[in-house]
Image (tube, helix red, strand yellow):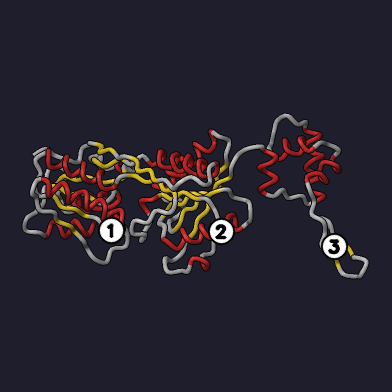
Amino acid sequence: MRRPQKAHNGVEAVPKKTTIRDVARAASVGIGTISRVLNSSSQVSRQTRARVLEAIRRLGFRPNAQARRILKRRSEIVCFLLSNRDFLHPFHAHILQGVESYASSLQHHVLFAVLHYSPRTPPEKIDLPPVLQEHGLIDGVILAGTIYPNLLRRIEAIHMPFVAFSNNVVGLDGEQRYDQVGFDDFNGALQATRYLIAQGHRLIDFAGDMSYPWIQRRFDGYRQAMREKKLKPVSIQPQNFDSFVNFGQKSAGRILARPSRPTAVVAGNDETAYGLWLSLRRHGVKVPDEISLVGFDDREEAVLMDPPLSTVRVYKEEIGETCMKMLIERLHHPQMAFSQRILPTEFVVRETVRKL
């Protein structure tokens, strides 16, 4: 590493930053060879690679983001930012998989970061991960997890192109000043409930925590299907729960305590459905013989239930792929109008629904 040197007036001068040309000169190679070494190309001999790496170490060379992209001649580096979720939430892991798969096909790169913040934190006080704070390192961001307006404002303030997973944006009241990709909560629940009705069910409850806007949209789809047939929608809302599974377990207790027990339940998501199934089973109530059950999301656990859960399938990898495509389009055409993509869902019939 170069040490500070005394200037003529006795004040320490700021050391000159090592450039790629300095490394090339020290290793007696061209800049193109440095590029190939940094990109792990197989077209460099072992001896030359060792000489270049030694020069990089000795000179303390750290290529900045712009230099790396010049060396590669292509490739964006994007950040998949998962906010207010555990590492790594299974649903969002599949979205990330779709992002990474499409990025890899174009030889682009995806960095993963986690952020926890309060919706009440002023935008300028949100402490972004270091990869987003280093100027020029990241070209764009894909926002997933639970996304509040203050994070959107924070990302806008650093002039970072981004695409948001729209289903989990909370509290924007229909604003659309950003690119977004999501899936159809409303129609997914609508189709699931219509299927139950087509199987002869008339007493159908909905169990889902509607403090989450995406669960509220699913309830709206359920309610629409019930009203189409002039059936009474019923929402089960237990108190003092600590997870979706626990919500489902407490919902089962309320359902079984009602004088007019439903023949079917639409769960707000698969975790709630699992909690319902678990509690009904403990109470000796058979699914689907006594109560039919449908979920939403089609997580891996759905097929592990006994019987396997009928549920609304969300194409999570396709969401990630579409986010990446949209972000690349934004990077290449910064002035284009903001866009929104809503991907369809599919109701998957398994074995938790009985025909009456």
- Is label 1 in contact with label 2 (beta carbons under 8 Å)? no
Q: Label for residue 246?
A: 1
Q: Label for residue 158?
A: 2
Residue 161 % position (x, y): 52, 50
Closer to us: mark 2 or mark 3?
2
Location of the C terminus by quadrant is top left
Q: Quadrant of residue 44?
A: top right
* Left or right for 125, reference 285: right
How packed mark 2 is, by other alpha carbons closer than 10 Å (few <14, some 14-19, many 20 or more), is few
Residue type for callout 2: Ile
Q: Is residue 120 above or below residue 245?
A: below
Tag 3 residue? 4
**Sequence order check: which comes first, mark 1 or mark 2?**
2
Q: Secondary structure at mark 1?
A: helix
Residue type for callout 3: Pro
Using the image as rendered, state which of residue 353 and residue 164 is in the foreground: 164
Rounded to the nearest whole Å, what is the CA distance between mark 3 and mark 1?
Answer: 61 Å
Rounded to the nearest whole Å, what is the CA distance between mark 1 and mark 2?
Answer: 40 Å
Q: Secondary structure at mark 3?
A: loop
* Left or right for 257, reference 37: left
Q: Is residue 138 above or below residue 99?
A: below
Q: Do we see residue 196 in this rendering?
A: yes
Residue type for callout 1: Asn
Q: Is residue 298 above or below residue 174?
A: above
